[in-house]
Image (cartoon, rainbow, N blue to C red):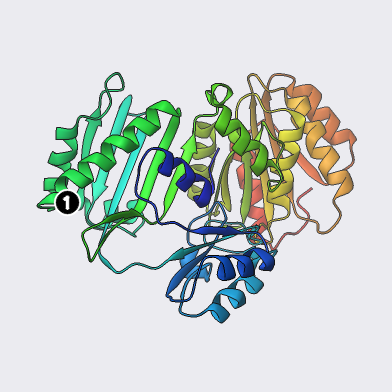
Amino acid sequence: MNLYEYQAKKLLIKYNLPVLKGCLCANLIDVKHYISSCNIKNGPWVVKCQIQAGGRAKSGGVRIVHDITDILSFATRWLGNNLITYQTTDTGELVNYILIEPSVKIIQELYLSILIDRDESQIVCIASTQGGTNIENIAQKTPDLIHKTTINPLVGMHPYQGRILACKLGLSGVKINQFAKIVVDATHMLLKKDLMLIEINPLAITDNDQFFCLDAKIITDHNATFRQSELLNIRATNKTYNTLPDNQWDSINYVPLDGNIGCMVNGAGLAMATMDVIKSLGGMPANFLDIGGNANKECIMSSFYMILKDTKVKAILVNIFGGIVCCDLVADSIITVLSTYNKKHIPIVVRLEGNNSALGTNRLIDSKLNVVVTDNLIYAIKQIVTAVKLNNVNIN
């Protein structure tokens, strides 16, 4: 489960991490109440749309404002409307809240993250002087500016490790111990809350040598959420705003991409391999979507519908290897969605292999829906790439 920024910051405060005191507003009444009750007379302030996707600032979802009129204008513009960024679908994400924080004078922005590195089978702390920038871009353009240290999960982060990291970042004086404390506290939080990722970006240093976590991304471990009552409450809150069912959102991995072939696959490795083959055959995936190994019908339907309503998708490829999930369940889910969705017609190719694949294939064929079914992955991808290149002609 991903947390909204305001939810992440509430957790950070509980673990003594430095966060600016802000106000969460769900409507204009909240905004006006905050303005009148908090002596908010002197700007500037930072106003932020609360969605679970990056790229908000570039899309106008984060602004520095200098007077109260601008705050009200920003709230009127975004509350109840969708914000589209490079990490959302073409329809964007609904903005239910905006966060108002005082603006601070920043002299340096750092990047800090603590995560479970599955490749290395350990906890890793990553820091860089290139704060405010996507870590993938830093790794690509200036990898020498990324510094890492490993963390023993049994004892957590030692302060001396934080100080070494601070020195590598070029910090000096009191800022070394301040930074070390932030890293130690954040690691403690990751371990106590069963988190998979804490990303603080930027971690700002102000003109009076104070650190502030200006933005934060937190991903929880859904396998451990049952023992985290606070996270269970957050999940219940987020459920209101997500289209996917409560216990299924965590198991779906979705990343929008720039192509036009929508993909629904079970298993991250199979999804990556599918995208590789699509590209090698001349196509462009519109997304990475792994529905997981034990998806139920509700989960499959929600995932398929999410791709279907993506306006940039010109064809859909479903690639299922039935291990735990049954292929007939996938077929039933697709049929249910297509039977009720009639906004647009796009080519759909379904590759089913494994558990109950023959049953699933027959159900799709008998449905009389415009779906091509095969057990051959290469054939399926060739068909979908051809369909897109031929401008969505009927490929049956």
- With 269 as the anchor, is 108 left or right in this view? left
- With 275 as the anchor, is 111 left or right in this view? left
- With 49 as the anchor, is 264 left or right in this view? right
**Looking at the image, which residue is at 52% across and 65% down?**
38
Q: Nearer the viewer, residue 150 or 294?
A: 150
Neighbour class for label 1 at 10 Å: few (<14), some, many (≥20)? some
x%, y% of residue 22?
48, 58
Q: Quadrant of the N terminus?
A: top right
> Residue 10: in sight, yes or no?
yes
Q: In the image, what residue type sits under mark 1?
A: Lys
Instruction: Give above or below for 104 relative to 170.
Output: below
Residue identified by numbered label 1: 175
Instruction: Give above or below for 329 relative to 104.
Output: above
**Looking at the image, which residue is at 50% across and 80% down?**
67
**Looking at the image, which residue is at 53% across and 67% down?**
61
Total numbered badges shown on the rendered structure: 1
> Residue 349: in sight, yes or no?
no
Instruction: Give above or below for 18 relative to 48.
Output: above
**Looking at the image, which residue is at 38% across and 45% down?**
199
Q: Nearer the viewer, residue 177 or 344?
A: 177
- With 370 as the anchor, is 187 left or right in this view? left
Q: Nearer the viewer, residue 181 or 82?
A: 181
x%, y% of residue 293?
61, 25
x%, y% of residue 375?
68, 30
x%, y% of residue 307?
68, 49
Q: Secondary structure at mark 1?
A: helix
